[in-house]
Each structure stands twice: as C-alpha cells, then as structure tokens.
Image (cartoon, rainbow, N blue to C red):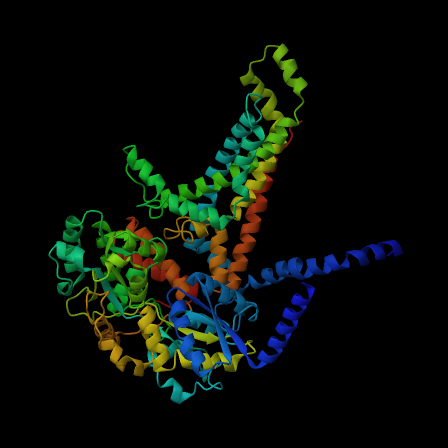
Amino acid sequence: MKSVIGCALATLIFASGAAQAQSEITVWSWGSAAPGLEATIPGFNAEHPDITVKVEKLGYSDVKSRVLAACAAGGVGLPDVFQFQNIEMELITAQFPECAADLVPLGFDAGAQSAFPEFKLFALRDEDRMLGMPWDSGPVVMFYRRDFYDKAGVDADSLTTWDDFMTAGAAIQAANPGVTMINDNLNGGTENFRMIAEEQNCGYFTNDGQAISVAEPGCVAALETVKTMVDDKLVAAADFNQKITNVTANAVATLMNGAWMEGVIRNGAPADQSGKWGVAIMPSITADGAHASNFGGSLLAIANNSDKKAAAYTFLSYALGTKAGQITMLKDQGLVPSLTSALEDPYVDEPSAFWGGQKIWKLILGRLPLISPINGSEFFSDADQVMLSVQTAYLNGQYTSAQEAMDDAAKQIGFATGLPIAQ
Amino acid sequence: MRRRNLTAYGFLSPYLLIFAAFWLWPIIYSFYLSFLSTRRAPWTFNPSMTWLRITQDTAFYNALWNTLKILAIQVPAMVFLATVLAVLLNSQLLRARGLIRFAFFAPVVIGEAAYAAVFRLMFNTDFGIVNKTLQAIGLSKVDWFANPSAAMSLIIMAVTWRWVGYNAIIILSGLQSIQTDVYEAATLERVSPRQQFFHITLPLLRPVLVFCFVLSVIGSMQLFAEPYLITNMGGPGGATETLGLFLYRQGFLNLNFGYASAIAYTIAALAVAISALNMWIGRDRT
C-alpha cells in the first residue's frame, strides 16, 4: 500500500514539474455570462492548450462587492480576471485606477479597440489607459408568451406605446387567470424605470457626467408609467431569481430586459414552453420614440496584481475579441456581442425554434444603432439607491406628483455627489 | 519601569501589536477619514461632505428610524417572549426538557444565509406557505417584500425567531440561580404563584434581563444579515434598511469611505448611549 502511495506521489510531483509551462487563470463571473464564457473555453484551448481557464460563477452583487472590497485593499484576493458592468466601471476607474490592469501594453491598442463601438469603451478609458475589454451589450426587448397573448387576441407587434401595452395587459390578465402582464424588481431595483427612462433619452446624469438629470421630463414620464402599471395591477414584483420562478410557473406574460435574458429564458424554461415564447420591440411613451434602450452589458478586466496578465489577455482577446468566441456566447447564452464584426455572422439570420421560429437576433441587433447610451458616472450606485427609495415612496403615494418625486431625487443625489442639478 | 513589568509587556506584545494594527489604528484612522471628502481622488479635507451631510441626509434618517423601530418593537417583545419561554421551560411539568430546550436554542446554530433563504421561500408572495395558509383561512395574502410595513414586520419576526431561544436559555439560567427556599417560604405564606412571579422572580431576574436587553440592543444596532438577505438589501426601497446596511452601502458599494466613517462613529455613539440608558434604568435601586 505504502509503495502505491509513493508511486502516486512521485507521479504527481513529476507531472506537476512537467506542467510548469501551463498557467491557470481564474475568472469571476455571474449569471448567464459565466456559462457563456465557459462555452468559449474548448475553442480557446484548441488554439492555446497551455492556458487553463477556470470560471467561478458567483452572484452579481457578490462579484461587485468582492471586487470593490479587494480593490479597496490594494487588489488583495482578486482573481486574474473579473467581470464588471459597464455602467458601474467608472467607480473603479475613478476610485481605484490601479486596481485593473492597463490592457494597452498587453495588446489592446487603438487598432484592437476600434473593433468595438465607442459607447462600450467610454467607461473603461482612463486617459490613455484601457482598464477592460468590452463584452456584451443589452439592447432592451420584450420577451413575451405567444400563447397568453393569443388567448386574449393581442398582437405583440402592435403595442407601440405603454398605453397600448397596459390596455393589452388588462385583456391578457383577464384571459389568463393567474398570469401577470409583466414583472419588475420593484423592491430591490429600478430596472423597468431605467429602461423606460433611457428609451426617452434620460439617465441619472447628463452625458458628460457633470450634472444630475434625473428630474428631466423623460425620467419623470418614465416614473409615471411605472406607477400607472403598478396601480393597474399589471406588475408582479420579482427580482432576477423570482422572474425565473415565474417563467417556470407560467405566471408571467412579458419580461422586459436586456437581450442577455434570452439565454436565461431559453435555458431556464421548462421544455414544454419551447415555441411558446416570442420577442417584440419595446413600447415607448410616445409613439414616435426610439423604442430602443440598453440594460446591462459587461466587460472583463484583468487584475493589476495578477502575475498571469499575458495569459489572461490571451484569453480575453479570444473570448471577447474574436468572432468565434463572441458567436459561441451568443448561441449558448444569448449574450449580444459588443464586437461589431460578430454582428454580421450568418447565425444572426437563423430562426430559433424556442422562439417560435422567429429570427430574434435580427430584431434584437436592429435595436443597437438606435440606443442612446447613458453615462453611469462613478456615482451610479449613489444615484440608483436614491432612485430606488424615491420610486418606492412614490409608488406608495408619498409624493403628490412624479415631478415632485424626481425633484426630491435630484436633490438627494446632489447631496450625495456634490454635483449640480442640470438646468 | 520595573523589570517584572517589562517582561509582562514583552509577553503581551504580540497581542498588543495585533490590537494596535487591527483595532486601534482603524479606530483612529476612520476618525480622521470621517472629515475627508472621499468622493474623488485625491481625498480632501471637507467635513461638509460627511458630518454636515449626516445631519441632513434623509437616507440616514430613514436608516436610523428603521433601526430605532426595530429596537423599540423587537427587543422588548423578544425579551418578554424569552422570559415567558424560560418560565415554561423551567416548569416541573415539562417532559423531554433537554430536547425542547435544544429545539428553542437551535435557530442560533443555523447559518444566517440558510435561514434567510428559508424565510424568503416561506414568505414568497405567490407560492409561500405563509400566504397560502393565510388564504386558506380566508384572509387576504400579504405582499411581504413589497409592502414596507409588512417587510419590517417580517424582519422583526425573523430576528425574534432566531434569538428568542438564545435569550430564553440565558434567562433560564437566571431563573435556576434563584434559591428554591424563597419560593417555599412564599408558598407557606400563601403568596399566589402570580404574585410570586411579579414580586420574587422578576426583581431577582433583573440583572439577567438587563444583560439580555443590552446584548439585544447592540445586536439590533448592528443588524445587517437579515435585511441584506431576506428583504433584498433593505427593501422595498430602503424600508428595512438599517444603520449597519446603510454603512455598508456607503462604504463598500459607493466607496464613500469618509461618509461611512462618520456613520460608523454615529452608530457607535448611539449604541453606547442606548446601552448606558438601559443600565441606568435597570440599575439596583438600593
């Protein structure tokens, strides 16, 4: 027995000695992005067998808080690569510019950068440095249940305004007992508000990030729309996991989300829902609106204190920087590529059986050029927390009007950030 | 200094060094930080972004108010329940005492994340057992996570469920330290059991009850895991946001270390003040 262990030990030592050229990189990622990234590993290893990639899937807020805590501690405990949301990245670029590695010397030069659209690069730039590589974007669309809509005789493509949507919602709920028209993370987030507001070209801050724009008409109208829907009992409160529960339980007719929800629904819904789902363009407050908005979308950054930066960059440039990598993630998890060239892949013209034979990617990618990007600024978390509590108070009738609520939100955000309110 | 003392400090030095590095220094440094605006690098001296803000910040007052609500409702309710429970657990009529005592103590042993997940499921609006039961007996369902008052009562229920047994065991040990001959004498004097409880048990239990109060007050001031895990980071919209959670948000989500330090000092001062008040009320009046 002893000799067996001895042999095994010797083999192990020998093996590890032989594999010294091998480097292993660890990635922190969340949600459907993690399995998407994992799907690119076989293709990557075919080209680079010497680099092992380990994707650790954590919750979104776990990644965020662990990365920020690690950055505050000078980078201690960071993995080699971590995912971050574009809209929140300025928190790191502004507060911990040394936490994420500059990718320019690793090869992400102006030429490589030009493969991505400017609105995805903006938050990653720190003067001449580039602190991450764009991953996916989140053009907003409506994911809806064809069978529920049909039962009420509603044509999803005819819902141009939110008023149309609400009228249809009442009919759909009447025709399908136990079904709610739409979900919103009312209790823990401002998702629907932000999507509706951005469609009206309104965000928390002006595009230069120097003033607070939350009290502008677009945002006020968006908050009113959210309240009307809640008051009409067309909304069930659900965070990300509860949305999936509601999908499985046939309890929701529509989900409005960034396109990355496509993979979550397709991979998470029970098999008998295949063919019952469809995708539609989002409604607008006014009929002539852009009907386009962005929600979510991430990047990958390399920890500055990683000793495997070159290997990590090699992986990034395959997974995010090649058509093969990006299309793999689109097929597997519905992650919409930021890489412009990937949008011309023949795959985007294919119909999808789960979505009732619809050519969903043609519709979704068609939204991209219409999106007016929003500046998250480094104060995004501050503003979003204020907005959440103001939204709750407004929904509970603690303000007389949406304008009053938003003026209060602007005042509070100003207090937290020191920025002026846009005139 | 005498040689003997030097040797003693020599032996203490590893601890003192760790204490200085991980306790004393952060305490001093965060006091310094509480005067800086840490919104943008480089950090500058600007107490109006921290100490002035804290006096005017509606979000801070909301968190303070929530914490005080929990203090005022949950702590007395829990100590009352724990006392009743301790008296029942102390009863001679009770069978399988060891098992039952453990059963009430068990919630403390369970990890916060696990019990929070179970509470979230039980109180789920559409599929949870609590709402299903309410509907089965003809009541309307409660939107536990969307209604501010319901969410607050959920937090209070959860914290009470978790800590009532723990406090009951402490009070039970207090009960058992009361000499039985006091009760025997009272019984001979025909003092009713109810009077015995109010005139013998409660006064003799006072030091233990004060101890439970102070522990629970400090615990409530630092309450974090329940609102973070059960009501989705203090939801809905900050209705269950406690001071602990507010501090965490400002420090580690908004990276506003200056403001977070000012909040930390405020929480510490409040905890000291409320505990002192508790001890003053519960002092021996001899």
What residue lies at 22% left-to-right and 67% top-to-bottom?
A353
List x then y, in percent, for residue A221. Answer: 23, 61
What residue lies at 59% left-to-right and 46% top-to-bottom?
B272
Q: Quadrant of residue A149?
A: bottom left
List x then y, in percent, for residue A311. Answer: 50, 81
List x then y, in percent, for residue A207. Answer: 33, 74
What residue lies at 40% left-to-right and 78% top-to-bottom?
A43
Viewer-proximal residue, B264 or B46?
B264
User: Does residue A185 show up?
Assistant: no
Whether residue A177 sits left or right of residue A317 in the image: it is: left
Q: How many marks?
A: 0
Q: Quadrant of residue A421?
A: bottom left
On screen, residue A140 above or below B229? below
| Furthest residue in direction bottom, as rendered | A111
Whether residue A9 sits left or right of residue A282 in the image: it is: right
Viewer-proximal residue, A155 or A73?
A155
On screen, residue A315 above or below B28? below
List x then y, in percent, for residue B35. Answer: 55, 63
Q: Quadrant of the C terminus of chain B?
A: top right
| Furthest residue in direction right, as rendered | B3
On screen, residue A147 above or below A356? above
Whether residue A89 sits left or right of residue A336 in the image: it is: right
User: Does residue B33 show up?
Assistant: yes
Q: Quadrant of the N terminus of chain B?
A: bottom right
